[in-house]
Image: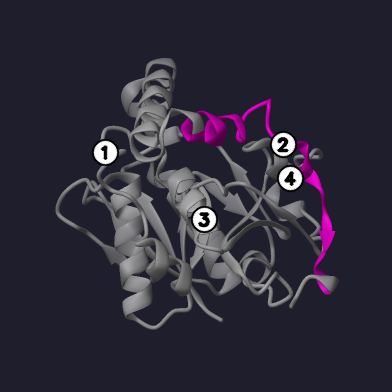
Amino acid sequence: MSVLITVPVFGQHEYTHALVGDLEREGADYVIVDNRGDYPKIANERVITPGENLGWAAGSEHGFRIAFSEGYSHAMTLNNDTRISKGFVAGLLDPRLPADAGVVGPMFDGGYPYATDEQKPDAADYIPRPRYRVVPAVEGTALVVSHACWQETGGMNLVDFKQYGWGPDLDLCFRARKAGFGAYTTEMAYINHFGRRTANAHFGAWRYEMGANVAMLQGLRRLHGARVALDIMRQIGIAHDRSAHRSLPLENSAS
């Protein structure tokens, strides 16, 4: 198995540079989608400049298409304002994960409740655990998709979530599970996420988050109806199904 990691960026280069150090340490294959066209390299980064601001969703999908056209078995989108644990890439591609894995993500220091590590360590200090969780969705901050899942689902929806780009990850996970693929969080990988640094820097935190959540719900409702949209949103909030917290051993999971 192999994965190409896409890091969509728009300024905030100090965060990207820190992440690049982690990716180089892991020997990861990665590409930076430079939406602003001014990214300064610090190593041998592969940088693609699309000539326009694709945003997170279209930038991620652009990376997915590159990954699968180049023969990778998996593609990943990873926010630039993150730091990753040791063994991160190997953990996400662990062959002990269930054979139906279509979407996989790491544990977080703060994110969807069932993917949040209670200890919230620094990524460099995280100790991987050979366990995984069956989850309703994987957060787009750090999301791996298999080639088979991407082909079957058509990838990210770039039409119904245009304004803010929030929601394509939830929609992708919903469609993946509906198509028979599993969505999983692995405890073998972990990230620190510093939280919407680029968006907050340019638009303001409160105004941006309110507008993005409303637009996300509207997009999900257009696609799947009000009941399904509300249930998708419920599953990433405080009213989520607690069964997603159940931690299962990896050694017994492969089929």
Q: In the figure, 243 relative to 125: above or below?
A: above
What amino acid does circle 3 point to? Answer: Lys
Q: CA distance from mark 3 to mark 4?
A: 17 Å
Q: Which residue has dot 4 on it?
A: 244
Q: Which residue has dot 3 on it?
A: 178
Q: CA distance from mark 3 to mark 1?
A: 23 Å
What amino acid does circle 1 point to? Answer: Lys
What amino acid does circle 2 point to? Answer: Asp
Q: CA distance from mark 1 to mark 4?
A: 29 Å
Mark 2, residues whose alpha carbon is within 10 Å: few (<14), some, or many (≥20)? some
Question: Of residues 31 and 223, which is closer to you in this image?
Answer: 223
Q: Disc 3 or 4, which lies upstream in sequence?
A: 3
Is label 3 in contact with label 4 (beta carbons under 8 Å)? no
Is label 2 in contact with label 4 (beta carbons under 8 Å)? yes
Q: Position of residue 130 (x, y in %)?
A: 82, 65
* Left or right for 160, reference 199: left
Magenta residues? 228-251
* Left or right for 96, reference 231: right
Asked which secondary structure carries label 1, the reply is loop
Q: Nearer the viewer, mark 3 or mark 1?
A: 3
* Left or right for 243, reference 227: right
Q: Disc 3 or 1, which lies upstream in sequence?
A: 1
Q: Nearer the viewer, mark 3 or mark 2?
A: 3
What amino acid does circle 4 point to? Answer: Ala
Q: CA distance from mark 3 to mark 2?
A: 18 Å
Is label 2 in contact with label 1 (beta carbons under 8 Å)? no
Mark 1, residues whose alpha carbon is within 10 Å: few (<14), some, or many (≥20)? some
- Quadrant where the N terminus sits is bottom right
Q: Nearer the viewer, mark 2 or mark 1?
A: 2
The tag on residue 162 is: 1
Query: Does the magenta run of residues contain 239?
Result: yes
Q: Quadrant of residue 159?
A: top left
